Amino acid sequence: MATLNNKKVAILTEEGFEQVELTSPKDALQAAGATVHIISPKSGKIKAWDKTNWGIEVYVDKVLGDVSPDDYDALVLPGGVMNPDKLRQNKDAIAFVSAFLDESKPVAAICHGPQMLIETGMIGGRTLTSFPSLQTDLKNAGAHWVDQEVVVDNGLVTSRKPADLDAFNRKAIEEIAEGVHA
């Protein structure tokens, strides 16, 4: 597996993220050597959603307003229904995600996480996957949606659901190790 020493990865999230869709990528990225920061518009702790009920609380490492996309080599967008729905209404969060896409830095989004990609207006012509309920929204945004465990399109890594996390984590690490995709 690729090593991510000297790589900094942002996980952008809000309350209501799907617990395993944050904890699994974070653990995998750290095991590969990356420095990982949980970034949120809120400071302190934010609460996970764990399948059917509230889950753990995680500490926010950095507040969104205090960081720059220039500080990070890659971005991870966990899913959960509430998390991306809140973030997609936040202009600073949209600008943060847009900067990674604009600079062709690796972005990994799972489940409902690709909702944030729609808000950027930058996924036209890209091939990706997501939780099936988002396929019409992604197609309407100009993306080519496919039903696959993991899809990689020029540094953009997407997966459908928690069962895809092993493949998602592996491909995210590979893309981050490769760096910027021109």
Image (cartoon, grey):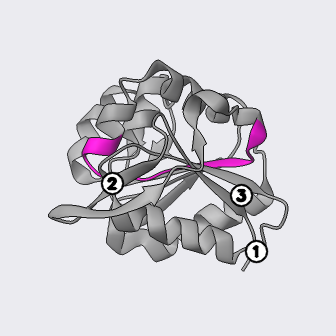
- Judging by the rendered image, the residue that carries numbered circle 2 is 47
94 or 54: nearer the viewer:
54
10 Å neighbourhood of mark 1: few (<14), some, or many (≥20)?
A: some
128 or 116: nearer the viewer:
116
Q: Earlier in the sequence, mark 3 or mark 2?
A: 2
Image-based side of 114 in relation to 25, left or right? left
x and y percentages locating residue 172 in the rendered image? 61, 62
Amino acid at the residue labelled 2: Lys
Q: Are the residues at dot 1 and dot 3 in contact (C-beta closer than 8 Å)?
A: yes
Q: Earlier in the sequence, mark 1 or mark 2?
A: 1
Residue at the extreme front: 44
Circle nearer the viewer, 1 or 2: 2
* Residues drawn in magenta: 71-83
x and y percentages locating residue 82 in the rendered image? 26, 43
10 Å neighbourhood of mark 3: few (<14), some, or many (≥20)?
A: many
User: Which residue is pictured at 49% across the width and 40% down the height?
Assistant: 43
- Judging by the rendered image, the residue that carries numbered circle 1 is 2
User: What is the CA distance from the residue labelled 3 to the residue labelled 2?
Assistant: 27 Å
